[in-house]
Image (cartoon, rainbow, N blue to C red):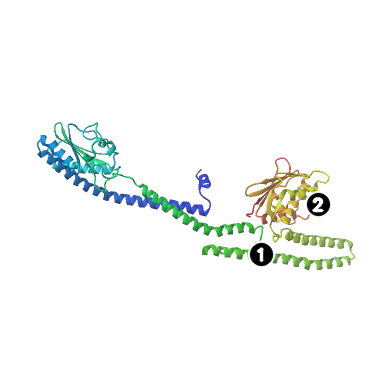
Amino acid sequence: MSLNLKRYFWPRSLLSRTLLLTVLSVFLAQGIATVFWYTQSKEREIEGLNFAAESMGNMFATTTTFFQTLPIEYREIALEQLRSMGGARFFVSFNKEEILINPIPQNDAKSEAIATLLKVLKNQLHNIEQIKIEFSYRENLNVLNNNVLLSDLPRSWAHNTLNLGPPSAPILVVQIELTKGQWIYIAAILPAPYLVLENALIHADQLVFLVAITTLLLFFTFTLIRNQTRPLKRLAQAANRLSADIEQPELLKEGASEITTVTHAFNLMQKRIQRYMHDREKLFGSISHDLKTPITRLRLRAELIDDEIQTAKMNQDLDELEMMVKGALQTVKDTDIHENVTQIDVFHILSSIAEVHNHEDLRVRLRGPQNIRFRCKPLAFKRCLTNLIDNAVKYGEKVIVYLYDNDHSLDITLLDEGPGIPEEYKTSVFEPYFRLHTDNHGTGLGLGIAKNIIHAHGGEIILSNRPHRGLQIDIVLPKVDQ
């Protein structure tokens, strides 16, 4: 299952794999750096937050002690004077009961701040039993009593205290029970840079920065890798065409040094193959020319022998020798890879071959689409199919040819009605001069030539016996890139 998932979902091209690995490496590096940065900065932030909370705790304790020193009837008067003068550093009120506070979500920073404040206040206010500390957002903050919100107060009361700072800044609220039925209510905003108590691992600005950096990195990586893989793609296309077109032009050397080295090696290999094929053609041409003279000479000498039986045997041997020479030359000629690759109409080629056998009886039937275009060497391709169809008609009487036009290959299947081929001879029938039949109407080269042509086009041929009667020939020819 895992192999199938990897096969279908894992990118196959070098470019897509490089981009995917780049994205993963960027996010992994950013993730590690973010965790490290978050841990370090959080420690420093908690340390600073504790210091700020301790300082505010001291000021809250001082404020509480100041009002404790005043008689109860003067506390409200002193507070009104402070409000009329434009407010104080904190919002302070005296209430008859504890006011319910809508708390902000719990987090580490909030817990640390509350613990520090509570510790300072308890150390400095020895005669106080109840101290309530909480953080709330200003839009939900109750003041004076449980029915009055901060927004309901006159602006002058809280303008210099609680309405400063960003709207998202939480407000610290400390409620201390001075005496039975009297609570002092003190609210303030934490000093900068602790205005917002957050534990977010990645903030919005960091996320935007990460996306921007990743986008730029992917763009430059895509441009670089695409420029480097373009020569590799051309090299792969040239290698695929090599089996069908040995005379293709040399590849341009471009790209990284490793790619130019591979391109140079490929060009040298192609030159060697071209030179080998040219030498082979000259060699067989020379052999043909050199053997014609001694064969003719031997025929003349055979006529001078008085023994007719020996003369007949010698002429038979010379006929076989001449047939072998012609067969070898025919093999070279029919599999000649110097022929140019062009686009053909496969159905038209098969129709012309079938027409030869369908004069008196319908021996060859074609099945499949009639508009298949295929790039190949036309003469060699036609020779290959001619040999296979001729054999099928000769030994199987009738044959059906099926055509299948797939995305990456041209598939051809031949079904005849003959006796088939014994399993032990399925490989041997492709050998030169090997024949299963003893008639004198063949050379044993047809299947070998057909196989060589198919291999020269990068394809495969498979022989199999049909369940009841007949031979099945399956041919797979890959489509060469344009």
Q: Nearer the viewer, residue 4 or 30?
A: 30
- Outermost residue to the right: 306
Q: Position of residue 339 (x, y in %)?
A: 71, 60
Q: Which mark is residue 76?
A: none
- Residue 449 falls left or right of residue 239: right
For mark 1, give the secondary structure: helix
Considering depth in this image, is 22 or 155 the residue closer to the camera? 155
Q: Position of residue 412 (x, y in %)?
A: 69, 47
Query: Which residue position is annotated with label 2?
Result: 439
In the rendered structure, which disc, 1 or 2, sits on the residue that comes first in sequence?
1
Tell me residue 226's x, y (percent). 52, 57
Residue drawn at point x = 39 percent, y = 49 percent: 208
Question: Where does the C terminus fall, quadrant-wise?
Answer: bottom right
Give neighbour class at mark 1: few <14, some 14-19, many 20+ (Cα, 10 Å): some
Residue 220 image point, x, y percent: 47, 57
Q: Nearer the viewer, residue 143 or 312?
A: 143
- Looking at the rendered image, the disc whose residue lies closer to the viewer, 1 or 2, is 1
Give the CA distance from mark 1 to mark 2: 38 Å
Position of residue 187 in the picture relative to residue 449 (left or right): left
Amino acid bearing label 1? Gln
Circle 1 sits on which residue? Answer: 274
Q: Is residue 250 visible?
A: yes
Disc tally is: 2
**Residue at 86% of width from left, 67% of height from top?**
300
Q: Amino acid at mark 2?
A: Asp
For the residues labelled 1 and 2, say whether their Cβ atoms are less than 8 Å apart: no
Tell me if residue 357 comes above or below residue 334 in the rendering: above
